[in-house]
Image: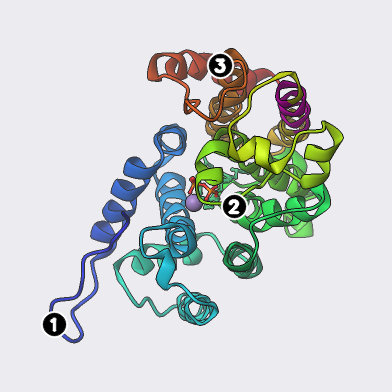
Amino acid sequence: MLQLPKPTQPNPPLASLDEAYELCRQITEKYSKTFYLGTLLMPPEKRQAIWAIYVWCRRTDELVDGPQAKLTTPETLDNWEKHLESVFAGHPLDDADVALVDTLKRFPMDIQPFRDMIAGQRMDLYRSRYETFEELQLYCYRVAGTVGLMSSAVLGIDERYRTAPWEKNQPLYIPQQEAIALGIANQLTNILRDVGEDAGRGRIYLPLEDLDLFNYSQEDLFNGVIDERWRELMRFQIQRARKYYTEAERGIRALNADSRWPVWAALMLYQGILDVIEMNDYDVFNQRAFVPTAKKMLYLPIAWLRAQTL
Ligand SMILES: CC(C)=CCC/C(C)=C/CC/C(C)=C/CC/C(C)=C/[C@@H]1[C@@H](COP(=O)(O)OP(=O)(O)O)[C@]1(C)CC/C=C(\C)CC/C=C(\C)CCC=C(C)C
Ligand SMILES: [Mn+2]
């Protein structure tokens, strides 16, 4: 469970900048081996900024998904949005905020993707089904595409994609759609990996129109039925997720050179979960698909090569 240390006195002094980034590092390492590995491939300033963003995203998700989630109401999210506004005004309210405020100074960002993510978590408060892919796509943009937008400010645009300095170095091309696509691809992968876990909580993220298409019922899903209908349904979902990864890949070359390797690595490691689901013959009810550490290490040189050549 993600808990920041509780204040022991009414207005305790906040952490120093080094302590705040160290806290964010520890939380990122603990909660996501994959993204943490990706950040280790970045220069220190970018790495720290991504940890700060990661922690804000994780805290937001925990409000509706963590052990205290039953206590979360729409007002909790309203308060979290006010907390966000304070951070964007440069006023940290707790230790993790200290790192995020500093990150915002170094890498100016729009508040909108942060607000959109809170709107996505709000959807989890009142929805447990998605009729169409269009509806699911909006959810995926909000909880994950937004991470692509937040991270892009840190990753930066390569100079080949910027205009001349006398034109104020404005980007010619910003791979926004591709950044969103990577977030959506990751989230679709998450959804496929966690079908069984989500069903255990009464949730179905797979669009109901897709279940209908393959004549597979909600009851089948809750009973964990694995048959040819299920495999076909999963093949369809995996193909859709891979299309988003392909779209994302096209944007990586526009990123700063020092960001391409970590993004390729994170993309390949996450996409690797889809391969594992296939190797498990689409059984996402009884086993959790994960990429073993040794395999993760194998992806790194391939990601490096892609970052230099593609
Ligand atoms: C041009 C181009 C391709 C640029 C790259 C842009 C980029 C880095 C995109 C990646 C975006 C990304 C990492 C999205 C994460 C999506 C995600 C996993 C969302 C999760 C949502 C809810 O899912 P669920 O509750 O089902 O999952 P859990 O079981 O609880 O895990 C989230 C949990 C929302 C919160 C997201 C995070 C905590 C992850 C944030 C990650 C980062 C900031 C790391 C970015 C990493 C690198 C290497 C840049
Ligand atoms: Mn979650």
**Magenta-colored segment: predominant secondary structure:** helix
Q: Is residue 277 visible to the viewer in this orientation of the structure?
A: yes
Residue 231: in magenta span: yes
Q: Which residue is mark 2?
A: 147
Percent coordinates x, y for residue 117 in the rendering: 60, 63
The C terminus is located in which quarter? top right
Crowd around label 1: few <14 · some 14–19 · many ≥20 (10 Å): few
Amino acid carrying label 2: it is Val
Q: Quadrant of residue 224?
A: top right
Q: Earlier in the sequence, mark 1 or mark 3?
A: 1
Front residue of this view, candidates 301 and 266: 266
- Numbered tag placed on residue 268 in the rendering: none
Q: Earlier in the sequence, mark 2 or mark 1?
A: 1
Mark 3 lies on a secondary structure that is loop
Q: CA distance from mark 3 to mark 2?
A: 29 Å
Say which residue appears at 61% left-offset and 27% top-offset: 271
Establish whether ligand 1 lies closer than 8 Å to the Cβ of label 2: yes
Percent coordinates x, y for residue 297 in the rendering: 43, 17
Residue 207: in magenta span: no
- Numbered tag placed on residue 9 in the rendering: 1
- Answer whether labels 1 and 3 touch (C-beta < 8 Å): no
In the image, is 58 to the left or to the right of 198? left
Q: Earlier in the sequence, mark 3 or mark 2?
A: 2
Q: Which residues are magenta?
A: 230-240
